[in-house]
Image: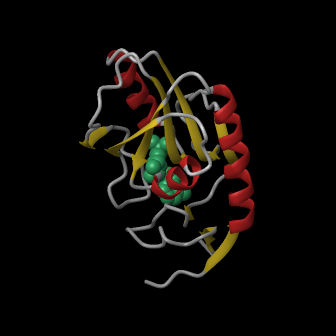
């Protein structure tokens, strides 16, 4: 099926915001050697751009979580499909995620990280989508806030399509 896409956030705005967030992280984590955990798959482009603006020591790891399948509806359970390669114990963890919708996926994962004995855990999300939030998530760094809508591009997909788009779009007429 072909979708008609409408631009929501332009490439240039994303670039500018990513630099601003990175400079805050550089300041806040200068002596903390944070462990950046990129949530796959959606977080991969945001995380790649963000870490290239970091000037502080840090490590990067990846976790693949599932709560959505290929559908638009959250099932409310988090499953680790592919796990970290380092232990996050005693680390200052910064989770990098594409978008928070209901908040269910991330809140469950944050609880898991706390059980693993992290020193701190905070969230950096590109898009804070408000309308369907069910669980309150403390967000330390947010790129943009949107009220609602299903977004694609800059890592976000619909049925695995559109992750490669440089801007962020929504479907027209949906
Ligand atoms: P949550 O548990 O409802 O917050 O779902 C979070 C995950 O669902 C995100 O990390 C995305 O991978 C996916 N998701 C939520 N909203 C969108 C969207 O508008 N476009 C693409 N993926 C989305
Ligand atoms: Mg995601």
Residue drawn 49% across and 29% down? 34
Residue drawn 69% across and 30% down? 27
Image vertical order of residue 40 relative to residue 156, above or below: above
Q: Left or right? Give the position of 8 relative to 36.
A: right
Q: Position of residue 50 (x, y in %)?
A: 58, 49
Q: Position of residue 107 (x, y in %)?
A: 45, 29
Image vertical order of residue 127 relative to residue 172, above or below: above
Colour scheme: secondary structure
Quadrant where the N terminus sits is: bottom left
Residue 9 is at least partly visible in this image? no
Q: Toward which corner of the image does residue 81 lie, by quadrant?
A: top left
Residue drawn 45% across and 55% down? 44
Q: Position of residue 131 (x, y in %)?
A: 63, 45
Q: Position of residue 40 (x, y in %)?
A: 38, 50
Give the number of marks.
Answer: 0
Quadrant where the C terminus sits is: bottom right
Image vertical order of residue 49 relative to residue 140, above or below: below
Residue drawn 38% across and 60% down? 71
Q: Left or right? Give the position of 77 relative to 81.
A: right
| Nearer to me, 84 or 109 | 84
| Nearer to me, 20 or 173 | 20
Residue 31 is at least partly visible in this image? yes
Q: Left or right? Give the position of 119 relative to 63.
A: right
| Nearer to me, 44 or 6 | 44
């Amino acid at each position: 099926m072909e979708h008609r896409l409408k631009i929501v956030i332009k490439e240039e705005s994303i670039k500018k915001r990513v630099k601003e967030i990175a400079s805050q992280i550089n300041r806040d984590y200068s002596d903390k050697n944070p462990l950046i955990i990129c949530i796959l798959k959606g977080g991969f482009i945001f995380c790649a751009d963000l870490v290239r603006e970091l000037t502080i020591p840090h490590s990067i790891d990846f976790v693949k979580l599932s709560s959505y399948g290929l559908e638009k509806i959250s099932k409310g359970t988090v499953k680790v499909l592919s796990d970290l390669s380092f232990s996050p114990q005693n680390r200052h963890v910064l989770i990098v995620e594409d978008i928070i919708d209901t908040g269910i996926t991330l809140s469950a994962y944050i609880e898991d990280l706390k059980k693993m004995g992290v020193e701190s855990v905070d969230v950096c999300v590109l898009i804070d989508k408000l309308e369907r939030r069910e669980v309150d998530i403390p967000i330390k760094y947010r790129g943009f806030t949107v009220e609602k809508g299903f977004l694609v591009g800059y890592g976000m997909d619909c049925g695995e399509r559109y992750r490669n788009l440089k801007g962020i779009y929504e479907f027209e007429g949906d």
